[in-house]
Amino acid sequence: MVRLPFAPMVAAALVAVLPLAAAAEDSEDNTRAVRILPDGGPAEATVPATPPAPPPANYAALNTAIKADNPAGLSLDMLPGTDVAIGTKIVFRIATRKPGYLVLVDVDSTGKLTQIYPNPRSTMRGAPEKSNFIKPGAPISLPDPSSPYAGYEFVAEGPAGTAMVVALLSEQPVQIVDLPDVAATAVGQADAFKQVYEAAKSLKIVNGNDTAPPRSVSWSVDAKYYAIR
């Protein structure tokens, strides 16, 4: 399998995978209208200090306890479920009551954070700056299992433990987020989501051809903890 060359693509619990023939096509960075940076510049990755804990019995309860701003009514579901074996192919079901630009980030069982959508393959069709735009009343599947043109898939990878995927929706065009890893001590805990959520709220939009000062982002957020076994 080939990992997508997508900044900041690192090891993740869910990995976007391309056919080998597609690797050469995606070796160059895509044109993006907007890049997002945290206050003070790019985030530095946090190196986990301790091994991840095993999947807790209450990871489903963690999902129930997630609280975040969500004015668009964004919802995120995982198929076939939130308890998956290594090697399982995952499909995300996304719905919203307001239009916006969708970003998915995955936090693996060691705390490593990776943006998995949009990715280089998903931006190849149509205008890159519109490739992750979703509409209300039209739930989407990522990747679309009925489409022969998706060109990528999400596969659960080890190590076993508790992981998390976070969906972020912005009214403003956004294709990349730059977020730090989650502290190893927070993996599998409510603080894991809190760290990602607070970091996302601190991000500013920087337009590449605009001299205007960075702008705050108003996110709608949903997330799912899941177990990899």
Image (cartoon, helix red, strand yellow):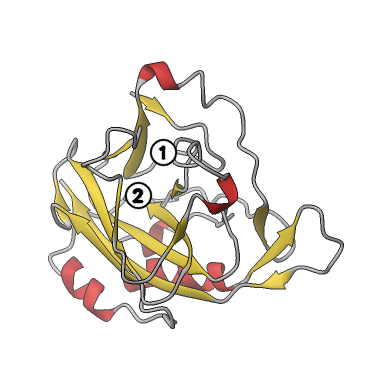
Where is residue 89 drawn, in percent x and y? Answer: 20, 40
Name the quadrant containing residue 139: bottom left
Q: Is residue 187 above or below residue 191?
A: above
What residue lies at 87% left-to-right and 62% top-to-bottom? 211
Q: Is residue 182 visible?
A: no
Residue 35 falls left or right of residue 108: right
Where is residue 6 drawn, in percent x and y? Answer: 53, 38
Q: Is residue 60 above or below residue 7?
A: below
The amino acid beneath tag 2 is Asp
Measure the C-alpha gap from mark 2 to mark 1. Answer: 8 Å
The amino acid beneath tag 1 is Ala
Q: Nearer the viewer, residue 134 or 143?
A: 134
Q: Which residue is mark 2?
A: 108
Q: Is residue 134 above or below residue 123?
A: below
Q: Nearer the viewer, residue 13 or 110?
A: 13
Badge 2 density bin: few <14, some 14–19, many ≥20, Cα 10 Å: many
What residue lies at 62% left-to-right and 71% top-to-bottom? 202
Mark linked to residue 11: 1
Mark linked to residue 127: none
Where is residue 114 drawn, in percent x and y? Answer: 45, 47
Where is residue 46 drawn, in percent x and y? Answer: 53, 52
Q: Quadrant of the C terminus?
A: top left
What residue lies at 74% left-to-right and 63% top-to-bottom? 40
Residue 140 falls left or right of residue 212: left
Q: Nearer the viewer, residue 186 or 141?
A: 141
**Labelled pair 2, 1 in contact (Cβ < 8 Å):** yes
Q: Is residue 87 visible?
A: yes
Q: Is residue 78 above or below residue 119?
A: below
Element under label 2? loop
Marked residue nearer the N-terminal end (2 or 1): 1
